[in-house]
Image: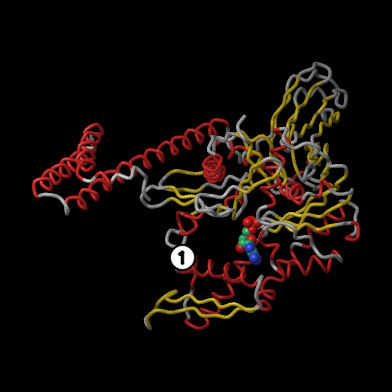
Amino acid sequence: MSRLIGIDLGTTNSCVAVMEGSEPVIIPNETGGRTTPSVVAFTKDGQRLVGQAAKRQAVTNPDRTISSIKREMGSDYRINIDGKRYSPQEISAMILQKLKEDAENYLGEPVTDAVITVPAYFTDSQRQATKDAGTIAGLNVQRIINEPTAAALAYGVDKEQSQKVMVYDLGGGTFDVSILEISNGVIEVLATAGNNRLGGDDFDTALTEYLAGEFRRDTGLDIHRDNAAYYRLREAAEKAKVELSGMLETQVNLPFLMSDKKGPRHLEATVTRAKFEQLTAHLVEATMGPVRQALADANLQPSGIAKTLLVGGSSRIPAVQNTIRKFMGKEPFKGINPDECVAMGASLQAGVLAGTVTGLLLIDVTPLSLGIETVGGVFSKIIDRNTTLPIKRSEIYTTAANFQTSVEVKVFQGERYMTSGNRLLGNFRLNGIRPALRGVPQIEVTFEIDTNGIVHVSARDLATGRQQEITITASSNLSQAEIDRAIRDAQQYSEEDKRRRAEADAQHEVDSLIYRAAAVSKKCTREDRKRLDEACSQLKKAVKSKDTSRIIAEEEELRRMLDTLDPAGNSGQGTF
Ligand code: AMP
């Protein structure tokens, strides 16, 4: 097994960490950033960009730039680019592939194994989709862990005295709150709640819409009609939001935002923190419902929580911190960088799996109840919400009709009494039940959830021993064949990428030789200059012919000539 990395695959930003000795260390990307935007773009000339490069060009290429794909994980959403349909798993895999490459460059060795985090509230199909994304990216996903659990590990609360802590995680696109119990190095998740469609993006939208309204009032122009202008405004709104976490007032200046008959129109606005708080108060309040729910599920009052850990970039918003302080009656805990702590915790968990970190055990819980449909569409729970994982539980069911020889087992996830209000995860049929009067056959249904939160269900007729089982992969998830195809595509892209890079390097080599020849020819005799010109023109012809061996031979010839005429000019070092 290679070095195990910990990955926080975030909605807006992703982050990767590795254990260096006993400390988790954040791996910087190729531009030195400690987090990488979870953005993928397809340029018009067929290139694929991931991270900062993709985010930077979003303004000019909005239709072919994909962000916040995490929100679609586990759904049947597809993105159509140049006639090819991409699943959320494949797009996420492109992000993971980039993080993997960054880690390989940093560590100087191949990376094949990872721990990836997901929001605690992710359903089974979303977890499975995340695991599939890892597989497509060429990673063995050793464990999927909940983000708040990872954060708690990073905060080191596992080493403190027994206590209950709350992890409040408001990221770019998801919100999670979890109540954890920590005792003797064991972290147990008592309750989780959240909203996987609430985050910093919504704060950006609120401010963008306010500024769009102001612009419309001043100019009569609708920013929504112009994609590029809208993206510029959104970017500026996010920047203003971040600034308002540190300042009481900020300026938004966007010259030449749009134009009309009167010419170019500019946006100039001042936004105060008070105005921002007024525009986003409903979003801050929306996080408090899940907070109350998690406390109620854990049977706790706010006073029973020793610490509230803040996680996610949006937890830096002062109104968020004030609201938590008021509700919990204590100052929230902000020891470490909220953007990085989840990846750090994931790498600590990776350390546990690799055996380099000891004395730590994680216990996770199911986020929603699981069960099957019984007669009349009634949901029969087999595993309750917030049950500790891993778990295996069986129930005995029987037939509803006389001489019924088969049953349909429909697996649901949710909290509603009727299955129609819950989510169907999958179904299968158990045939060959020994014919008998209704109520006589005994059918044992077993649910097993592993430490990754992935569900296996089986049904067995106790009279005949016949058994059927499934591992739940909801219908919106990818089949094995689709995953295999996506893996091949990803590998092919990575090879194509290498080929492109090799071509670019070769072209660079030719360019630098010709450039060097031009410099040398200025200071040599007329005869030598003629020889150099001839060698350059032969090399250019070779490049046009695309004949690799001819190119190499002509390069060699020119290089030899230059080394004789100008030995000092050959530094032997690569150039930028
Ligand atoms: P994360 O998903 O944890 O990386 O969080 C990203 C979100 O946090 C984005 O919506 C950012 O705009 C937001 N964010 C980052 N820093 C700040 C800040 N200082 N104040 C407010 N929001 C922030």
Q: Indicate left or right for 247 with 48 as reference.
A: right
What amino acid type is highlighted by mark number 1?
Asn
Is disc 1 placed on a helix, strand or loop?
helix
Label 1 within 8 A of ligand 1 by Cβ: no
| x then y, percent, for residue 436 | 84, 20
The image quarter in which residue 418 lies: top right
> Does residue 172 appear in the picture of this structure?
no
Q: Give above or below for 470 relative to 576.
A: above
Q: Could you tell me which residue is drawn at 17 percent across and 50 percent down? A: 521
The residue most toward the top is 464
The residue carrying mark 1 is: 227
Q: Ligand 1 is located in which of the four quadrants? A: bottom right
- In percent of width and height, residue 133 lies at 58, 40
Question: How far across and down, in percent of the image, does residue 7 sit?
Answer: 63, 44
Quarter holding the N terminus is top right
Q: Label 1 crowding class (10 Å Cα cut-off): few <14, some 14-19, many 20+?
A: some
Residue 571 image offset from top left, x and y in percent: 33, 45
Which residue is more in the foreground, 463 or 314? 314
State the residue lying farthest toward the left: 527
Q: In which quarter of the view is residue 388 placed?
A: top right
Q: Residue at x 58, y 67 (%)?
A: 238
> Against 400, is 199 above or below?
below
Q: Does residue 407 appear in the picture of this structure?
A: yes
**In the image, is 439 to the left or to the right of 503?**
right
Please determine whether, in this image, residue 234 is positioned above or below residue 107: below
* Horizontal side, residue 282 vs residue 261: left or right: right
